[in-house]
Amino acid sequence: EPLNCTVHVRSDACEVWVGTQVLSRAQAAAARVTGLPPEKVTVHNHLLGGAFGRRLEIVEVETAVRIAKEVDGPVKVVWTREEDMLHGRYHPITQCKLTGAFDAANNLVGLHMRISGQSILASVRPEALQNGRDPATFQGLNPAGEFQFGYGIANLLIDHAMRNTHVPPGFWRG
């Protein structure tokens, strides 16, 4: 379905109808734009699919509320697919180069894994970075713990260069 949001702003309350994965952020955004306290903002969530990660954003709520403040009665804003794609966030661009070393019996004895790419967290939750690193980039590659690299390679080096471009990264949309 196309990205859309319906809003009715009154002097004492605001109602928002939107498909979102982040109700609290949608409510907070409407409260911020209207100047109303959050308890005066009601968000009616529609359980819809097909936005390919776009339902994590609240830009459509902010835009629709700004427009609805200027008119009497409810306002429905619908984005075209072209507008949606132009302003979306996309799956991070990441590249990985592997260089390996083998012994005489063709056993892997050394591996250098160099990852270069964007970070979703640097864009949407920079406070979640750990020592300047995006832990999501290293899922399955950590030396120990829940996301441990599960192979025993005697000489292993995994490094990362975060390269964030002008295209904002996000979840799911490819």
Image (cartoon, rainbow, N blue to C red):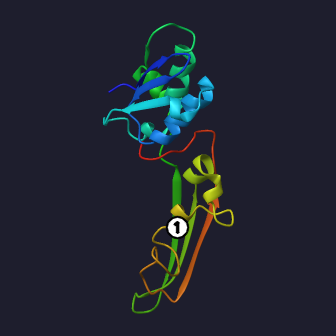
Front residue of this view, candidates 90 and 24: 24
Q: Tell me the kind of residue under disc 1.
A: Phe
**Residue with the mark numbered 1:** 138
Residue found at the very far right of the displayed protein: 131
Residue 98 to residue 24: above or below: below
| As drawn, 38 above or below 101 | above
Of residues 138 and 107, the one nearer the viewer is 138
Above or below, 118 relative to 138: above
Q: Secondary structure at mark 1?
A: helix
Q: Is residue 163 left or right of residue 62?
A: right
**Rendered-image quadrant of the N terminus:** top left
The residue depicted at 40 percent of the width and 87 percent of the height is 106
Say whether residue 87 is visible: no
Q: Whole-percent x and y of residue 97?
A: 53, 65
Question: Residue 37 placed where, x, y %?
Answer: 59, 32
Label 1 environment density (alpha carbons within 10 Å; few <14, some 14–19, many ≥20): some
Q: Position of residue 103 (x, y in %)?
A: 46, 90
| Depth order, front residue of 146/6 | 6
Q: Quadrant of the C terminus?
A: top left
Q: Is residue 95 visible?
A: yes
Above or below, 106 relative to 171: below
Numbered-mark total? 1
Residue occupying image coordinates x 54% and y 44%: 169
Q: Is residue 160 left or right of residue 87?
A: right
Residue at x 51%, y 49% (from the top left corner): 92
Q: Position of residue 157 (x, y in %)?
A: 58, 78
Q: Residue furthest top?
A: 72
